[in-house]
Image (spheres, rainbow, N blue to C red):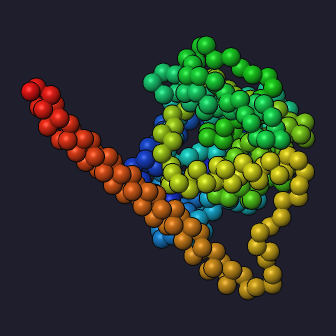
Amino acid sequence: MNSNPKVIVVIPTLGKNLGRLGRAIESIRQFTSHTNLELLIIDNSYEANLNLGESVDEVYSPGINLGWVGSLEFVRRNFDFDFLWSFQDDMTILNDALSVLVHALQQNEDLGVVSPIMLRNGVIPARTRGGKFIDKSKMQIAHIPETDVYPHDFIEEDDLCFVSSSGALWRKESLDLISGFDLNLYPVNHVDVDACVRMIEKGWSVKIETGAHIEHEITGSTETLLSSFLYQRNKHFLISKSIEIEAKEIYPVNNFDSDFLYELSRRSTYIFLELSKFATEKIQELQSANLKLTNELEKQKITKSKPNADLRKF
């Protein structure tokens, strides 16, 4: 067994909040004692000009938005490592989490992925760290933990179906055995569920490690409307996989010029995000207008009721 395994920490980002990204990087540098570590930023912004200096080992700018799943899968396919640490740009670590996660994988060679606990105001928030299936065919999940819980009261589960990918450490051997992350789940949502389920089917186990601590703002770059759509869309995709319906590519790739496909995909991924942002803003405008209308109606009711009240005095 390698006593000093190679770890790549990958942080995908759109680069919209450099302060937040900086805090994520700083926490890794501050708390991590593991030496065989490479910190890789995937710059998914359209501008692709992110400059972080010597705080990171490499910034890769694909020119298109690879999303969460594409960023992780790109690293799996193109980099040499033992363990992959999936890190979000709105996340920080609170202790030497990596050393704890590495130790867990080294101690159990059947463990495919291990995920830390998340702390907020001293407690682990409900539904944040993993889950078990109530009904796999319908993707009904009992999330772990069920309610907010203090770390010392957290009960580790032996029959987990998946763990959260935020801060998770993945064994490359187990990822390669399942052919990596499923790009049909682009750009995000249920990626961890799918990968863990396929690992377990191949004989691997998954675990939540209470000795590794993270903090996660959960304020990533995905718009609320888009996130809701992706949650439902990808959930139905996994249902189709669970009942063994072959997942078909919506858009088959023909023998087009690769540069042509690249330029087209570059534009389509950002139109996709811009449309979601536009729709979210319009919904917010409508909600604001509706609130104003509701308040105006309430004022009119009060105005109309006052004369009636005065008449009742006579």
**Quadrant in which the C terminus appears:** top left
Q: Is residue 234 above or below residue 147?
A: below
Q: Nearer the viewer, residue 135 or 94?
A: 135
Q: Position of residue 304 (x, y in %)?
A: 20, 41
**How many marks are shown on the rendered structure?**
0
Could you tell me which residue is drawn at 90 percent across and 36 percent down?
203
Residue that lies at the very extreme toward the left in this rendered image: 314
Residue that lies at the very extreme toward the top in this rendered image: 153
Q: Position of residue 24 (x, y in %)?
A: 49, 44
Q: Nearer the viewer, residue 288 or 80?
A: 288
Residue 121, quarter of picture: top left
Q: Is residue 180 above or below residue 34?
A: below
**Quadrant in which the N terminus appears:** top right
Could you tell me which residue is drawn at 67 percent across and 50 percent down?
232
Q: Nearer the viewer, residue 115 or 224?
A: 224
Q: Is residue 78 visible?
A: yes
Left or right, 279 with reference to 294: right
